[in-house]
Image (spheres, grey):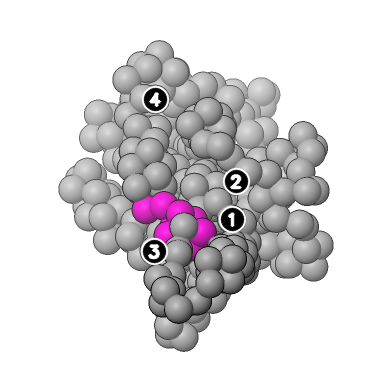
Amino acid sequence: MSRNNGNSRNPLHGLWALTNRDLKKWYKNPIILMLGIIQPIIWMSLLGKAMNLGGMFTNFSPTLPPSISLPLQEQIKAAMSDLSKQAMTQIFGTADYFSYMAVGMMSFVVMFTAMFSGMSMVFDRRLGFLNKVLSTPVARGSVLLAKIFSAVIRALVQATIVLGIAYVIGPLSVGPDFTVLNLLGVYAALFLISMGLSSIFILIAIRSTRQETQMAVVNLLNLPLMFASNALFPASLMPEWLQTITKINPVTYATDATRQLILYTIDMHQLAIDFLFLGAFAVISSTICILLSWRYLSK
C-alpha cells in the first residue's frame, strides 16, 4: 500500500478477487455450466452422428452389371471401399468424421464462452458494481483482466468436458503422435484463442449499458466465426473468397492446432504457424483491451 494515499501501486491489485468473484457466479450455479455444454453435445450427438460422412464414403457400393463375374464384382467392391476410405482420409485427415467434428467442437465451446464474456461487464455496469470497483484502488486493467481470465478458465473447463464426452460417445480417434503431453499443447491453443476473443468482446462491452447490444454483436458474429473456419468442414474445399476469410479467422488456427495434436501426424511447421498466429492474436487483443480501458472504462 502507498504511504501517500493508501492506494496500491501494484497494477495487478485485486485481480484474483475479481476473477474469483466472476467464477463463483459460474461454479456455484451448475445450471449455467450445463447450459454451456449442452449445445456442443447436441451438435456432436445429432450432427456428428447423423451426418455420417464416413459411412457415406466407406459404405458406397456400386451396382455392377450381371455380366461381370461374381469374384470380379467382389474385387471391384473391395477396391471401391478402399478408395472411399482413402478419400475420407484425404479430405478430413481421418476416416472418422465424428472425431474431426468433435475436436472442432472444442473451439466452438471456447468461442461461445468468450463471446458471452462481455455480458458480465454489461450487468456489472447496470447493477452498479462496476462503479464501486472503479472507486477503489484496483487498476482498470485488472478489472478487464479479471473478466478475461474468468472467461478463459470457464472455456478450458467446458472444452475439457466436451472432449471427455466425445471420447465416451465416440469413438474418438487419435493420431499416431498423440500422447498425454499433447493435451498441454491443446490447452495452450485454447487458452490463446479464448484470451484473444474474450478481450475483443469485453472491449466491445466496456461502454455498453444494454445487454441487447452485446447480444446483437454475438448473434452477428457467431455464425461467421464458426462457418468461416475449419471447425466443421475443411477450408481447402471452400470457395476461394471464403478461404481468404478462413485464413484470418483465429478459430481456424486454434482448430487446426488441436486437430494436429489429437488426430493427425504433427506437422511442426504448420503447428508453429498456428501458435504464432494465436499468440500474436492473444497478445495484441488483450493489450489493446487493457490500454483502451484506461481511456474508455469509466463510471
Residue numbers of the magenta segment: 51-58
Mark 4 lies on a secondary structure that is: helix
Identify the residue shown where x is 53% and y is 28%: 168
Mark 3: which amino acid? Phe
Give the foreground label among 4 and 1. 1
Q: Which residue is mark 1?
A: 95
Identify the residue shown where x is 44% and y is 18%: 27
Q: Is residue 85 above or below residue 49?
A: below
Label 4, residues with CA under 10 Å away: few <14, some 14-19, many ≥20: some
Q: Which mark is residue 48?
A: none
Left or right of 192, for residue 36: left
**In front here: 172 or 69?**
69
Q: Residue furthest top?
A: 28
Q: Are marks 1 and 3 in contact (CB under 8 Å)?
A: no
Q: Main secondary structure of the magenta part?
A: helix
Image coordinates for residue 65, horizontal then vertical, percent: 41, 77
Q: CA distance from mark 1 to mark 3?
A: 22 Å
Mark 1: which amino acid? Ala
Q: CA distance from mark 4 to mark 1?
A: 32 Å
Mark 1 lies on a secondary structure that is: loop
Left or right of 24, for residue 11: right
Q: Are marks 4 and 3 in contact (CB under 8 Å)?
A: no
Image coordinates for residue 239, horizontal then vertical, percent: 43, 82
Q: Which residue is mark 2?
A: 190
Mark 2 lies on a secondary structure that is: helix
Image coordinates for residue 93, horizontal then vertical, percent: 62, 61
Q: Which residue is mark 4?
A: 33
Q: Is residue 289 above or below residue 5?
A: below
Q: CA distance from mark 2 to mark 3?
A: 18 Å
Q: CA distance from mark 1 to mark 2?
A: 24 Å
Identify the residue shown where x is 66% and y is 27%: 2
Identify the residue shown where x is 46% and y is 57%: 59
